[in-house]
Image (spheres, rainbow, N blue to C red):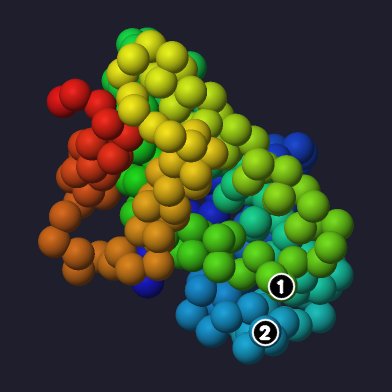
Amino acid sequence: MTSTPIADLWPTLPGADTRPEAAYRLLQAAVESFAERGFHATTTRDIATAAGMSPAALYIHYHSKAALLAEISQAGHAATLALVREAAAGEGGPAERMRRLVEQFTAWHARARTVGRVVNYELHALPEDAYAVVAALRLDIEREVSELIGAGVAAGEFEVSEVRTAARAVTSLGIDVSRWYTERSSETPEELGRRYGELVLRMLGARI
């Protein structure tokens, strides 16, 4: 199982430049273990062993496996939000920006599929305070997409009866890629992104 290394996501979190290398190893091991077994079936020993460390060493950096999941989830959603904001604020009209957003959003969930699977399908396992942080990030992502769709409707480029529902449909398409995409898939992340970009524009009623 391969994906974007977890360390690539860490610039989105405070204090990233001071984190020890051992913390990154634990996070990568946790991502792979959670994706393979699920959060509840994964033990701290599983994570520590995969990271080449003792179970006791894990607690030097994280007080529980829930703390690992919380950090992974926050980092994954923060990285996704940054991608969405950049695409939505880019050059061109709403349809052009939406195509670019969907292409990048889809490709990210294909490349970083292991992280994407964990952060989107293990939400129920987050502690309440961590869930609140992640829920706010998810709301920000949905808001960015909704505002872009609304701009497209106002400009006459999209025909959408309910913007929020359309925004959820757009993000759900990309998120689901992390569930089924593998290294054996017939399309590259970029090819899939281009096809999804066209599908979304058609769904939104754009003339392409």
Q: Is residue 191 above or below residue 129?
A: above
| Between discs 2 and 1, the one toward the N terminus | 2
Q: Is residue 152 visible?
A: yes
Q: Is residue 112 above or below residue 160?
A: below
Q: Which residue is mark 2?
A: 40
Q: Which quadrant would residue 6 be assigned to in this image?
A: bottom right
Drawn side of residue 173 relative to residue 32, left or right: left
Drawn side of residue 10 relative to residue 125, left or right: left
Q: Which quadrant would residue 201 be assigned to in this image?
A: top left
Q: Is residue 112 visible?
A: no
| Number of disc labels | 2
Q: Could you tell me the amino acid type at mark 1?
A: Ala
Q: Position of residue 207 (x, y in %)?
A: 19, 24
Q: Residues within 10 Å of mark 1 (few under 14, many from 20)?
A: some
Q: Quadrant of the C terminus?
A: top left
| Residue shown at the point (54%, 39%) measured from the top left | 164
Q: Nearer the viewer, residue 165 or 148?
A: 165
Q: Are marks 2 and 1 in contact (CB under 8 Å)?
A: yes
| Residue shown at the point (76%, 58%) measured from the top left | 131
Q: Residues within 10 Å of mark 2 (few under 14, many from 20)?
A: few
Q: Could you tell me the amino acid type at mark 2?
A: His
Q: Is residue 188 above or below residue 98?
A: below
Q: Which residue is mark 1?
A: 125
Q: Which quadrant would residue 11 be assigned to in this image?
A: top right
Q: Position of residue 133 (x, y in %)?
A: 77, 48
